[in-house]
Each structure stands twice: as structure tokens, then as C-alpha cells.
Amino acid sequence: MAVAKKALGSMLSSLRLIANALENHRLAHAYLITGPPGSGKQHFMERCSQLILCDDPRFGLHPEPCHICNSCVKFERRLHPDLLQLAPDGRYIKIDQIRSIQKMLSFAPLESKRRVCTITAAERLGIDAANALLKTLEEPPDNTYLLLSAISMARLLPTIVSRCQIITFRDEINSTATNREFGIEGVPEDVVPFLKYVSGKRPNLANELIESGILDLRQTLFEFLGTSRKKELFFQTSQAISNPKENIEHAIKIIYTIIRDLLLLKQPEPSLHELMVNLDKKQELIKLAQAINYDSLSEYQDRIEKASIYLDRNVNPEMIADMLLMFWLKTTKLKTG
Ligand SMILES: [Zn+2]
């Protein structure tokens, strides 16, 4: 499948870029990895972090940490003291979070020769936090490497962007593949990107998802999102997405794509709008995007990730459904519907 190969290629070539710089002692002190939600930024940051911390990394065409050194063992147990990970606490990454990282950075690495600090969703750095971080970027401590991720550069302070090397992931899931190219039948062409996304570009899984009713479920969710009668439809929608139990798993996937599209529509660069996957729902999504602010969307994205964890822990599906739908009652005030 050409599309999957391309996405993988971008991950691999970016990893080679980092590995090559590492091998030649030219690693930049800060990298900013940009790309739409789900394009693999987080996975890439993890792989880079382990590679940078590894005592005996393999370079070449397929860069790989050794997986056996002390550093790799600790990394894989998520216990590496020289990996500092930062993510928004609520809506923003706060200045106190940056300060506590800076305090740790004032000491030498504890275990490895190098140290890595990752900052997820850097577009959610509060202004004070961003300014504080700037000091670290201006004078990075020795052997310290920062990896930042963001949907796009546009929401970051230009002074931060200018101090980072940029790596861009473009998961072109909605490039013009037809049904036949993707291996599914009987759905409109503009639904294909959604199916590609939720199936991880696996046609067999996409067909299974169609059979299990994922498109009807998506329709139910869009009807709920588009109406001003959300309170009236709440119970009915909550039931529909949690019963049978498998539906909640689908619903989480669907809502994730919706948030992903809305976050893209909120970006100032029109080229990012084109990466949305619910193409057949573009008009509805544009309307929704106008009704919700960016920060609450980002926060909701975290909540969806929590919902997946709850699901794994066998939390009651109806509770998860209520939790997911509640957000829309509070945040959107659509007059039409
Ligand atoms: Zn290693």
C-alpha cells in the first residue's frame, strides 16, 4: 500500500536525520516536530529519545537503539532519569512545569551521557511558560536535547520556532485515493479518508468497521453535534454509542477524528485544513469549529485519550459515553440545528 509506505518513510527518514546528526556529533539542541494529530509525532519523539540516550545505538539505514544497554533497559521500563517529559497540565503547559524542568536541567545527566526533554503539544505553552522556555533554548545546558511537538508552528512564539530545527510530518491520509484503490466498496468517495484513518489504512479492518456500523454511529454523533437540542438527545445518543459495548470503542475513534479535524480547521494555514479526514462533513465541521475555542478542544483531546484508558480498564461504557458527550453540552452553543 503506497500511502502507508510513504508515512513510514517519513518517520524513517526523520529518524535517520536524527541518527546521522547524533553519529556525527551535530545533533541540534532543539527539534520541533510538527504534524496533524495522529501523524506519529509522539511515537517519533519516543524513538528519538531512546536513540539519543542509548549507549550503543545502531546507525545507518535503520537506526535503532541497542535495547540491551542499561540506558535502554531503563528507558523501556519508563524509568530513565534522563528523560524528562512534559505535557499540558489541563489547558496549558504552565510556567511552574517549565521551572521544575529547568531546575532538573541545572544538574548533569544522571545516567546517560546525554539527556532528553520532550515537550508534547508545545502549542499549548502559556505565554509565561513559553518565555521561560526561551531561556533554555537560548542557552541549552550541555548534553541536553529538547524535542517539541506541535500541530503547526503557527501557534508558537516565532522566537521559539527560530531556535529549533523543524521536522514536519504530513500524514496525507486524504490524498485522492479512490474506493477501489483502498479496497472498499459501496461508500461515497469522500468517506474513504475517514475509513482509512480509523482502520490505520487497513482495508480489511475498514470493511469490518463498515459492517459493524461505524458509519451509522458517526452519523448519530454528527447529528448530536449539529443540533441545539443536545440535552434532549443526550440520553439517546449516549445509549447509541455505548450499547452494544463495542460501539464505545468505535465512538472514541470517531470523536478522535472529529477533534483532529476541528484542531486542523483552527490552524491558520489553509494547507492544514486540507488534511481533515471527515471530508463529507466539512460544512458541519466548519460550523462547529467556529463554536468551540482551541484550548477547550485541546483539552478534550486529552479526555479522549483518557477514555481509551478507561475502556481498557473495563470502566462502564455508559459512563465513558456520558463523559465524552458532556463536553459538547458545555462548550458548544450552536443556534442552528
Ligand atoms: Zn541502548
Image: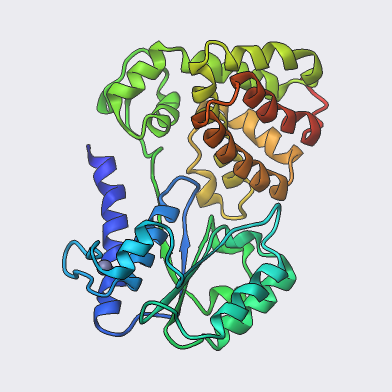
Q: Quadrant of the C terminus?
A: top right
Q: Is residue 79 above or below residue 20?
A: above
Q: Position of residue 282 (x, y in %)?
A: 58, 31
Q: Is residue 265 above or below residue 149?
A: above
Q: What is the image's colouring?
A: rainbow
The foreground one among 284 and 196 is 196
- Ligand 1 positioned in quadrant: bottom left
Q: Quadrant of residue 204?
A: top left
Q: Is residue 158 visible?
A: yes
Q: How many marks?
A: 0
- Going by the picture, which residue comes out furthest to the left? 60
Q: Position of residue 200 (x, y in %)?
A: 36, 34
Q: Position of residue 285 (x, y in %)?
A: 63, 33
Q: Position of residue 294 (x, y in %)?
A: 69, 49
Q: Is residue 51 visible?
A: no
Q: Residue at x 33, y 18 (%)?
A: 207
Q: Residue at x 45, y 88 (%)?
A: 142
The foreground one among 217 and 119 is 119
Q: Is residue 157 above or below residue 77?
A: below
Q: Residue at x 47, y 54 (%)?
A: 35
Q: Quadrant of the N terminus?
A: top left
Q: Quadrant of residue 192?
A: top left
The foreground one among 29 and 107 is 107
Q: Is residue 235 left or right of residue 24?
A: right
